[in-house]
Amino acid sequence: MSRTLRLTIALLALAFVGAPLARAQDARPAAEAATATKPVVVFAAASLKNALDGIAKSWEASTSKKVTLSFAASSAIAKQIESGAPADLFISADLKWMDWLAERKLIDAGSRKTLLANTLVLIAPKDSTKTLKIEKGFALAEALGDGRLAMGDPKSVPAGTYGKAALEALGVWDKVAEKVAGAENVRVALTYVARGETPLGIVYGTDANSEPGVKVLDTFPADSHPPIVYPAALTASSANADAKAFLDYLSSAEATKIFEGQGFTVVK
């Protein structure tokens, strides 16, 4: 074999050996970039939809990062996380379901913070002529007549749990319990009233603010139900470095402006 032929074969061998290495080196930055741009997945209480939609848009515009938002009753999304749903951040409409995940060690306890507070209101369709003042023993059953009272399912949905507690404290729960149209989350209850499917409903003050199809008849006294607060925490399984940044952004001046614009009280 000539010296020239041997040299040619050697060069071809190096080319074939080097090609996979080069391809692997080229692929590594692409893989790292894909990981770096993975959206932050947020599971949040349904009542936060309008506010979080606006906050996510603002954060994405300022950081070029992405957020994926999923809304449902706090109970439903907590159970999804327990079942292994790939959430990075959980925001509940009450302490119960955050504590429930904490007991199962499914949140990062060190990241937990209380973000917001809310009110509870009695609503009617916007064209309703009903008037009703909330007080001890108020005539809620009479105002309903043959209709039903829309509210979150009192057995699992925080807004329904708060609503039942308020009605019990005011001494009218037993008269209306059989008239309750329990919804899968507070936004569904809001829709029942806005469409005129029920004459009255109990929702958060922020929900009523977001829906032009309803009007507020009165606000439940703060001492008639447990404080309505929204805790947030990273999930224990999250490996997304951007998740903490988004959680921190929820306490920023821009996020505060959006939350307050929707009617929430920001907890300092």
Image (cartoon, rainbow, N blue to C red):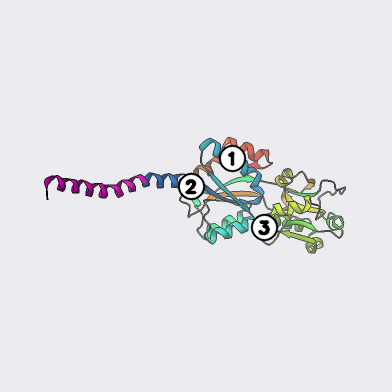
Residue drawn at x 66%, y 60% as measured from the top left: 156
Who's the residue at 67% across and 38% down the image? 261
Location of residue 202 in the rendering, given as x and y in whole percent from the top left corner? 75, 52
Mark 3 or mark 2: whose residue is earlier in sequence: 2
Between circles 3 and 2, the one closer to the viewer is 2
Question: Dot 1, crowdedness within 10 Å: few (<14), some or many (≥20)?
Answer: some
User: Residue 104 appears at what percent x and percent y?
Assistant: 52, 61
Say what amino acid the circle numbered 1 marks: Lys
Closest to the observer, 40 or 24: 24
Q: Position of residue 168 (x, y in %)?
A: 76, 58
Q: Which three-letter amino acid code belongs to the residue tagged 2?
A: Lys
Tag on residue 38? 2
Q: Residues within 10 Å of mark 2 (few under 14, many from 20)?
A: some
Which stretch did the figure color magenta? 1-26
What mark, if any, has residue 57 been given in the picture? 1
Residue 44 in view of the camera: yes
Which amino acid, by three-letter code, is at mark 3?
A: Val
Q: Earlier in the sequence, mark 1 or mark 3?
A: 1
Up/down of 2 relative to 149, above or below? above
Compared with residue 173, is residue 42 higher up or lower down, i.e. above or below? above
25 in relation to 98, above or below: above
Residues under labels 1 and 3: Cα distance? Answer: 27 Å
List the residue tagged with mark 3. Answer: 157
Q: Nearer the viewer, residue 171 or 251?
A: 251
Q: Is residue 80 left or right of residue 197?
A: left
Relative horizontal placement of residue 215, taking residue 4 as reference (left or right): right
